[in-house]
């Protein structure tokens, strides 16, 4: 028989020491790239050239950050990343809103208002979400050119909204299906229709899942590279594309400190969201990953 | 189906003389609401894929052909693809990359999850640290690791400065080893996610099993090996499919970290697709992307049957 109550934790058992040693060493390994990024971005170019990548900066300077934001070059153009930051914002905000709105309604309809064939569409959507984007990209380029939005921010927003649908539909469908059915039935008996139930009953109860969806979509869309490089057109490149162009630009001197500052600037939005959201982020990726 | 309720018109009293609505109008609102989903499924996932497969049998160069009678070439693009040494190298790189990054991500992710499951303190802090790379773009991961592994400034230089002047770690600049440098970056980015999935799996296992094993005096490692791991097979399979399908799509990481080089040594199928599709030979790019589709299909379709078949039982 095991005694009830919480187990007393033995502090200094050798096995515990081993567990913590492994975890701490792994944590250090995972943090090293972040450390290198920050340290390098705070050094002057002279100091970077000395090549002591792990050493703390002798003189902390924010020059590289300033340059990355305001005047880093790609080719002959030296405008920095600030316009691309705003491009990323202009892409991310509408894409997140549209894709979540569609995903929520889809999920609600699939969970509560099934009809013949609705499951079929859902399964095709799920399997379709595994299709490599490269397969669908060229026809989408043709489609977006045909309606005259290719090479604008709108094309990127439309593409993100389309490819966000499978995961979000799944997320919302599972969430709405987990709510008690009596709620839905009661509202129906009271005479609420499709949209009535959605806005009056379902939406007020879905704050947690909306938060998860927003976290997933903001990080996912902000981090995208492929759609940005293909659909946005050079003047509308999002931050990730600009970052790659700055770092892999062949002309001129390689300014590693500027590269690292640009890298941190690009990662700042998703990292902030990640550190604030904590457990919700984990819930989101777990929901997204373990399908069904 | 428990949540499905008859539409309001069907709830009318039995004596009422309302005509039953036409079948197509049943749940009409729901059908209208699902229009974007159906349009996406039909036009994008099915339509665009079929378009790509169809045009891969033509000889379109810069733009898709409009004269099929003249430009239909059968499987010529595919024979050309499979005899191209650049494609062969891309596929080989993809296999090596996927194999090693999967193995390392699985083993490290599972071990970390096991350690995280030992009722440790600061679990949230550790999880935050292991998982943050996953919140970053592959572009960022690629750039950071390219910098850390740069032979002239990075790890190699630092170790040499410590006194081991013969130390060599130049994978990223070495044609034979460059793929393994991509593995390092991919494992760094993916292990946290794998750990989170595995930890969710471990937490889903009934406490009673642990108690029973403890009562029987089975050592902990043995319980993991003989009981827990076999029980977690569904989690392993799902994770395997996710990561394998993700590996086939690898693109951003390579572009940012090596640009496909040095030379052509770290070419990947997705880069091959992109370069032919948008630069020189459209149909060749489409053929290559159709092959990618087939590869993902081979990974995903059996799994989908297994997943959905299991639910029906």
Image: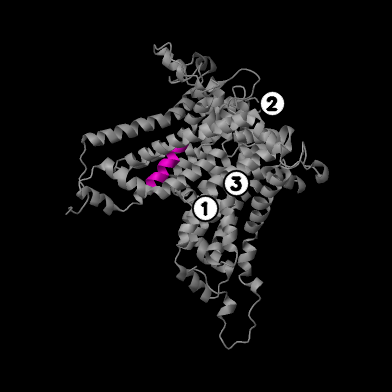
Q: Report the Cα–Cα distance between label 1 and label 3.
A: 13 Å
SS type, badge 2: loop
SS type, badge 1: helix
The earlier-in-sequence mark between 3 and 2 is 2
Q: Is residue B100 above or below residue A205?
A: above
Q: Mark 3 lies on which chain?
A: A
Residue B82 percent coordinates (x, y) = 65, 34
At 46% from the left and 50% from the top, the residue drawn is: A290
Q: In which quarter of the image is the C terminus of chain B?
A: bottom left
Identify the magenta region: B190-200
The label shown at residue A77 is: 2
Left or right of residue B50, residue A54 in this image = left
Left or right of residue B109, residue A242 in this image = right
Dominant secondary-structure state across the stretch colored magenta: helix
SS type, badge 3: loop
At 55% from the left and 33% from the top, the residue drawn is: B94
- Residue with the mark numbered 3: A131
Q: Residue A164 or A41: which is nearer the viewer?
A: A164
- Residue with the mark numbered 1: B304
Q: Report the Cα–Cα distance between label 3 and label 2.
A: 36 Å
- The mark lying in front, picked from 2 and 1, is 1
Q: Mark 1 lies on which chain?
A: B
Q: Report the Cα–Cα distance between label 2 and label 1.
A: 48 Å
Number of residues whose C-alpha sits closer than 10 Å to that of mark 3, classed few (under 14), some (14–19) or many (20 or more): many
Quarter holding residue B65:
top right
Q: In this view, does B215 lie above or below A116?
A: above
Quarter holding residue A198:
bottom right
């Amino acid at each position: 028989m095991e005694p009830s109550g919480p187990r007393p934790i033995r502090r200094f058992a050798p096995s515990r020491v081993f567990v913590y040693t492994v975890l701490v060493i792994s944590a250090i390994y995972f943090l090293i790239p972040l450390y290198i990024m920050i340290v390098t971005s705070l050094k002057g170019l002279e100091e970077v050239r000395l090549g002591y990548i792990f050493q703390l900066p002798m003189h902390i300077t924010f020059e590289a950050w300033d340059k990355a934001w305001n005047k880093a070059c790609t080719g002959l153009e030296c405008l920095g990343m600030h316009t691309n930051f705003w491009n990323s914002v202009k892409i991310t905000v509408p894409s997140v809103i549209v894709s979540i709105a569609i995903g929520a309604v889809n999920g609600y309809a699939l969970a509560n208002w099934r009809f013949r064939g609705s499951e079929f569409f859902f399964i095709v959507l799920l399997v379709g979400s595994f299709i490599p984007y490269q397969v669908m990209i060229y026809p989408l380029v043709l489609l977006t050119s045909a309606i005259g939005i290719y090479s604008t921010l709108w094309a990127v927003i439309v593409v993100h909204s389309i490819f966000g649908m499978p995961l979000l539909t799944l997320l919302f469908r599972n969430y709405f299906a987990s709510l008690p059915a009596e709620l839905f039935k009661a509202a129906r008996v009271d005479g609420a229709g499709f949209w009535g139930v959605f806005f009056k009953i379902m939406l007020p109860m879905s704050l947690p899942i909306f938060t998860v969806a927003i976290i997933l979509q903001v990080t996912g869309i902000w981090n995208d590279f492929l759609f940005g490089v293909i659909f946005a057109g050079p003047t509308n490149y999002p931050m990730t594309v600009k970052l790659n162009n700055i770092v892999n630009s062949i002309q001129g001197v390689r300014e590693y400190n500027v590269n690292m500052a640009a890298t941190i600037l690009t990662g700042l939005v998703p990292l902030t969201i990640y550190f604030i959201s904590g457990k919700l982020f984990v819930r989101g990726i777990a929901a997204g990953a373990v399908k069904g | 189906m428990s949540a499905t309720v008859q539409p309001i018109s069907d709830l009318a009293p039995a004596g009422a003389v309302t005509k039953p609505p036409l079948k197509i109008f049943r749940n009409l609102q729901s059908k209208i609401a699902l229009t974007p989903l159906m349009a996406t499924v039909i036009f994008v996932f099915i339509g665009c894929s079929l378009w790509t497969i169809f045009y891969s049998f033509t000889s379109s160069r810069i733009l898709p052909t409009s004269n099929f009678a003249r430009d239909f070439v059968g499987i010529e693009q595919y024979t050309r693809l499979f005899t191209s040494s650049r494609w062969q190298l891309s596929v080989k790189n993809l296999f090596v990359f996927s194999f090693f990054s999967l193995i390392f991500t699985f083993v490290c992710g599972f071990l970390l999850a096991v350690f995280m499951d030992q009722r440790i303190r600061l679990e949230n802090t550790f999880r935050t640290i292991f998982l943050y790379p996953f919140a970053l773009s592959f572009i960022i991961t690629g750039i950071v690791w390219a910098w850390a592994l740069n032979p002239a400034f990075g790890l190699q230089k630092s170790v040499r400065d410590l006194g081991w002047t013969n130390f060599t770690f130049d994978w990223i600049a070495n044609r034979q080893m460059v793929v393994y440098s991509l593995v390092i970056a991919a494992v760094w980015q993916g292990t946290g996610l794998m750990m989170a999935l595995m930890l969710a799996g471990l937490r889903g296992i009934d406490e009673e099993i642990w108690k029973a094993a403890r009562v029987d005096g089975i050592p902990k490692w043995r319980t993991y090996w003989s009981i827990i791991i076999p029980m977690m097979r569904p989690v392993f399979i799902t994770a395997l499919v996710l990561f394998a399908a993700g590996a086939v799509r690898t693109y951003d990481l390579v572009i940012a970290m090596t640009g496909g080089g040095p030379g052509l040594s770290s070419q990947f199928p997705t880069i091959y697709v992109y370069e032919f599709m948008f630069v020189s030979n459209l149909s060749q790019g489409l053929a290559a992307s159709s092959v990618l589709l087939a590869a993902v299909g081979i990974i995903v379709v059996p799994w989908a049957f297994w997943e959905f078949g299991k639910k029906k039982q």
